Amino acid sequence: MPRFKRYAVPVVAGAVAALGQAPVDVPALLLAGFAAIFLLVFRRNPSPRQAAGIGFAFGFGYFLVSLHWIVSPFLVDAARHGWMAPFAVVLMAAGGAVFWMLAFWGGRRLGPRPYWLILTLPAVEMLRAYIFTGFPWATPAQSTVDTLLGQALALVGPHGVNITLMAIAVAMAHSVLRWRSGGAVIALGLTVPLWVPVIAPQAALTGHVIRLVQPNAPQHQKWDPLMIPVFYERQLSFTGAAPTHGTQRPALVVWPETAIPWALNRSQVIVEEISAVADGTPVIIGAQRTEDGRHYNTLAVIGAQGQVVQRYDKHHLVPFGEYVPLGDFAARFGFYGLAPQHGAGFSRGAGAQLLDLGALGRALPLICYEAVFAHDVNAAPERPEFIIHATNDAWFGTYAGPQQHLAQTRMRAIEQGLPVARAANTGITAMIDPRGRVLDRIGLGQADFIDAPLPQPHAPTLYSRTGDLPWAVIMAVLVALGALRTVARQRRKP
């Protein structure tokens, strides 16, 4: 078979698998894509080198489709950064594909059939979540948040669900291979966990209401001096509006990431104005701040007396967005990230921390990108009562990016058994219950606010107590045993 045709099928299978992710959001297609590529491996029995090529092509098709939104940040200032957009999406797709190439190569080295891919693919996905600060966006488990299988995130986390998905896909491929037409029926039946919706009682409520504010400031206008007052006044008016949830006043108001364009430590008048409009209700705002010549992406809690009473500095920053690796050196040549307004980028905060919000309890703050990482949420010093996610998804465009980011936030809710109050600049703002269900929301591109009742947290989940370590150990031990078995088998050959 010509090389182009040889790898066109894996690319198409990867593209089909990517349709399991939002916004298409059909997780059975994700299983179908993986099952198709596993069936291909069953039938071709490729060499390790050929398997690596198949894995790269499959991963490239998957990540090219699922991460196509990555062009959006470069188009905010198209005259300056637009030329980078096609390179960015191709390089991001190729970068993800390299991990899957390693999985297919390793799986083939461990055995002639694709059974080892049940372990090697989730293993490289775990590696992708950690290495080089991590980027687990569009991991297969992300597609399951609306399904019964997605509830397993509370037990085994994203990597355990990835193992389950790979096992189902291999079983589907084996069914088709062994039983031909009858196997297709069996394979279809194996997708049932991805068709069944979440079946559970409505979330119990705390009796408190949180107001979530969405100003809808498009990124290309967010820093426009003519538009800054418009967006600021809009947030003030939403904060001071009459209650919409009966007559109950909100116990907390949450503004999104970088909700004000002024440095927090030089905005005392602004802080006092926000406090006055809130009329005694604490307000959490996103802002930048400076300290000792460093710049931070911050969430600040404004108290009833017009003072910042608590703050949190983002600690998991976006590479090449909020900071540039070796940034001081790169800045000498005029190379900066996309987001910084000052200097070579933002500085890292001290780490995960909790905000004490009185009667509401303690909240774990996450800023934008931090909601992508399950292990960041597990790094909280103590278990909170709920999660606050403040984000500016205007960077991610108006289609796939914000919807996928919401799906990841919902994953964190299921994994921890905690509600999430999410305020997004341009959407999607939402109140999420501990099973990952969206109870109330503001859609993309709307300026509005919601008064959303806060659900009660569930008991600590198994995953919140164990994290990723058990799966890392299990996969490492099994792969190591498989490698030893392969070496021993090769030594026995004459």
Image (spheres, rainbow, N blue to C red):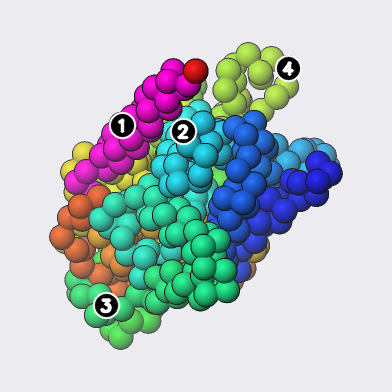
- What's the amino acid at mark 1? Val
The reply to whether the C-beta atoms of the residues labelled 1 and 2 are less than 8 Å apart is: no
Of residue 227 and residue 273, the one placed in the foreground of this image is 227
> Mark 1 or mark 3, which has the lower sequence index?
3
Distance in Å between CA atoms under marks 2 and 4 = 46 Å
Magenta span includes 466: yes
Residue 333 is marked as 4
Residue 330 lies, in percent from the top left, at 66, 18
The reply to whether the C-beta atoms of the residues labelled 1 and 4 are less than 8 Å apart is: no
The residue that disc 1 covers is 477
Of residue 200 and residue 310, the one placed in the foreground of this image is 200
Magenta span includes 352: no
Of the two numbered discs 1 and 2 in the rendering, the one whose residue sits closer to the viewer: 2
Distance in Å between CA atoms under marks 4 and 3 = 56 Å
**From the viewer's perspective, is residue 415 above or below residue 335?**
below
> Mark 1 or mark 4, which has the lower sequence index?
4
Distance in Å between CA atoms under marks 2 and 3 = 41 Å
Q: Secondary structure at mark 1?
A: helix
Q: Is residue 399 left or right of residue 420?
A: right
The reply to whether the C-beta atoms of the residues labelled 4 and 3 are less than 8 Å apart is: no
The residue that disc 2 covers is 110
Circle 3 residues within 10 Å: few <14, some 14–19, many ≥20? few
Q: Residue at the location (38% across, 32% down)? A: 482
Q: Which residues are magenta?
A: 464-493
Q: Residue at the location (68% across, 50% down)? A: 10
The residue that disc 3 covers is 200
**From the viewer's perspective, is residue 105 above or below residue 231?**
above
